[in-house]
Image (cartoon, rainbow, N blue to C red):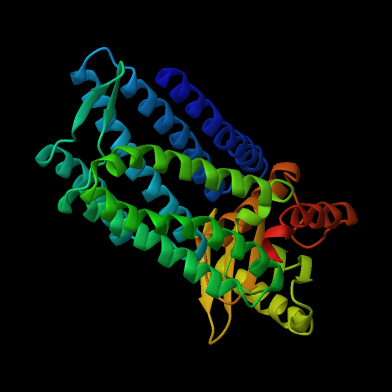
Amino acid sequence: MIIAFLGAWVSALSLPLAFLFKVTWDTFRKYHLSPFLVANIITLLGILYLILTLLGNLSPNPLIAFYIFNSSIILMGIIAIFVFIYFRLLRTEKLSISIISICVFLILLKIFSLIINPIGIYYYHEVYIREAHLTDLALLAPLITILLIIIEVSLLFKETRGNPMRKKYSKHLLAAYFWIALLVPTFMIGKKFRIISIFIPYLEGTLTSMIALYLSLIFYENPERLILLPVKFKGFLLHTYGGLAIIRKALDPRFEHVIPLASSLVASIVGLETAIEKPRAFYLFRVHKLIETTIIMFFGRITVGTFILSHDNIIVRDILKRIVLEFEEIVSYIDEGMITDEEISLAEKILDKYIEFLS
């Protein structure tokens, strides 16, 4: 009876995770943006956590159960770290060495706590069950990670609420991930009552699946909105190395009058780069920061793409790079002093593909 229930539990909770994986994987294949890949990893690890929990329950002896359960605990910690990285990617210019070091430290701390304070395992009705890992040292890593996730989600909501469309979706992300805060009092109760402690691993799996289900329902028709950028886009430019504009597009109508001037400035920068950089360097970024505006340029093989926006962002760089590279995959040669209607139409089509992320 218990075995059948556990099998049904894993099967039922794996479905939302598998569905969200399909949605994010299809979207990743279309855009090749890193947050979708991180979402893929989170959903796969969530399914693996459920499977490891079931395998631990059905282990033939306590030693195998012990190692499988330990692996599942570490895996849940890694899932939480990837959730933090996902939201961090949306907000920042880059993942700094200090952030990466913190993530590695939290995982190592969890492993160390498992060595110092091994988990308790019990045999009940032909299955092995475990207590949650709730010593003071063991709780340090998950509590810090939960705090980091809540901070990142809250900051993302704060920074996107000025845009009505982004605010609409960031509210859903905030609602989905604030549920993990419920784990904190549950951990505290679990330290006092063993029966609660035994149910916590299943609660974590259930919560992971419920978040996946909620996100699937909200973002299924528009998965691009899983990438909510706290950036104000002002314009996009695409130039030849001769300084000729292929596209000059205002992404905010309020900056329509600025785009021609910005295009002239970028053309001058491209000309200066071409004149003084010998040999010419390709596939690199240049960032020029003004008081309230940032100009991000990506130098491709035959074109230079530019975003004019409020501040730098790692995902914006990925989008800019993808636009330039996709254009150059189709257009292998372009006259630096002359462009055709076909090239303009192609560039506009590629930009339209990514417009969901820019509005």
| Residue reaching furthest to the top | 60
Single out the residue that lies furthest toward the left. 116
Q: Is residue 169 above or below residue 263?
A: above
The C terminus, quarter of image: bottom right
Residue 70, compared with residue 125, is above or below; it is below
Examine the rendered structure and indicate whether residue 211 appears above or below residue 95. Answer: above
- Image position, residue 182 (x, y; %): 40, 57
Q: Quadrant of residue 57?
A: top left
Judge by depth and name the residue closer to the eye, 168 or 284.
Answer: 168
Position of residue 309 measured from the top left corner of the image (x, y, whole percent):
62, 74
Residue 275 seen in render:
no
User: Is residue 160 in view?
Assistant: yes
Q: How many marks?
A: 0
- Quarter of the picture containing the N terminus is top left
| Along the viewing direction, whichever of 250 and 240 lies nearer the viewer | 250
* Left or right: 249 in relation to 24: right
x, y percent for residue 100: 32, 54
> Where, by quadrant of the figure, is residue 352 drawn?
bottom right
Q: Position of residue 14 (x, y in %)?
A: 53, 31
Identify the residue at image location x=78%, y=85%: 257
Residue lying at the far right in this picture: please name it.
341
Could you tell me which residue is drawn at 54 percent across and 62 percent down?
Answer: 174
Q: Judge by depth and name the residue closer to the eye, 86 or 203.
A: 203
**Residue occupying image coordinates x 71% and y 64%:** 239
